[in-house]
Image: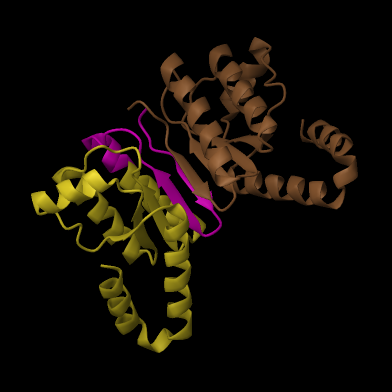
Chain colours: A yellow, B brown
Amino acid sequence: MDRVPILVLGDVLLVSIQIDLEDQLALHLQEDLAEKISASSAHGVIIDITALDIVDSFVGRTLATIAAVSKVLDAETVLVGMRPAVAITLVELGLTLRGIRTALNVEHGLRLLRDLRAADEFEPDDEDEVTADDSAASR
Amino acid sequence: MDRVPILVLGDVLLVSIQIDLEDQLALHLQEDLAEKISASSAHGVIIDITALDIVDSFVGRTLATIAAVSKVLDAETVLVGMRPAVAITLVELGLTLRGIRTALNVEHGLRLLRDLRAADEFEPDDEDEVTADDSAASR
């Protein structure tokens, strides 16, 4: 397989990563996601990593890049389904996944995206501050 | 990887199959799904096969078994994301995926499940007939 499928759930894109993200696959995923966000006007991206036994620095960097690109395209990225052991390893390795929001599972991720969206709509003049507050709260 | 992750979306379970369903993996998926349906009282299962280049008779049988088990546990199964080439090959091979509903993508699948649920609730006395009509309409 050379592509990770991207599922559309209303205005949210859902990606379930089930195999090791090698260089080429990660690159394809970044490109595909950027194109799909732009084509579908999605406002959120949920990346599920339930199936991953390990998140190394390469995967961490890939996820951070995806989140940064999505942000530029006005879509928030939420990482969900992280196994407890993966979280422990991440912290032990000193990888903080800076700039990536996390949630327990897909449902919590969807709710987080909805809340972020609602906050943005209520305070359009104050957008930068709201975003900063939210990301602080989600850490 | 030895398990296909099962994502929970409200009362629907979502499975995105991205790698070849070998014997052991297919067996695990059947067991995991049955357990998860029973644990979460899900009323629907959506199986996404966007990533599959081919659906052979083994995969077809596996999907049919999953649909039959889910049905016994009161959950409908919808197969989504089938590539046009896969559909053509299926028909050419004479595999009709009997007993499995299909929809274009996850969103259509969710809507189909919602409609089926609504029909069931409106006509509880007539459940068998409604189900028969629905499955005829979805083919």
Residue B30's spot in the image, x, y percent? 52, 26
The quadrant of the image that shows the C terminus of chain B is: top right
Which residue does the image show at 63% across and 18% down from the upper left?
Answer: B90
**Residue range (magenta):** A1-28
The one of B92 and B136 positioned closer to us in this rendering: B136
The one of A48 and B49 positioned closer to us in this rendering: A48
Please say whether residue A7 is one of the residues in the magenta stretch: yes
The one of B68 and A26 positioned closer to us in this rendering: B68
Taking A52 as reference, is A129 above or below it? below
Residue A78's spot in the image, x, y percent? 35, 58
Displayed quadrant of residue A23: top left
Residue A64's spot in the image, x, y percent? 23, 55
Residue A120's spot in the image, x, y percent? 43, 78
Q: Is residue A133 left or right of residue B8?
A: left
Displayed quadrant of residue A100: bottom left
Which residue does the image show at 30% across and 84% down from the upper left?
Answer: A129
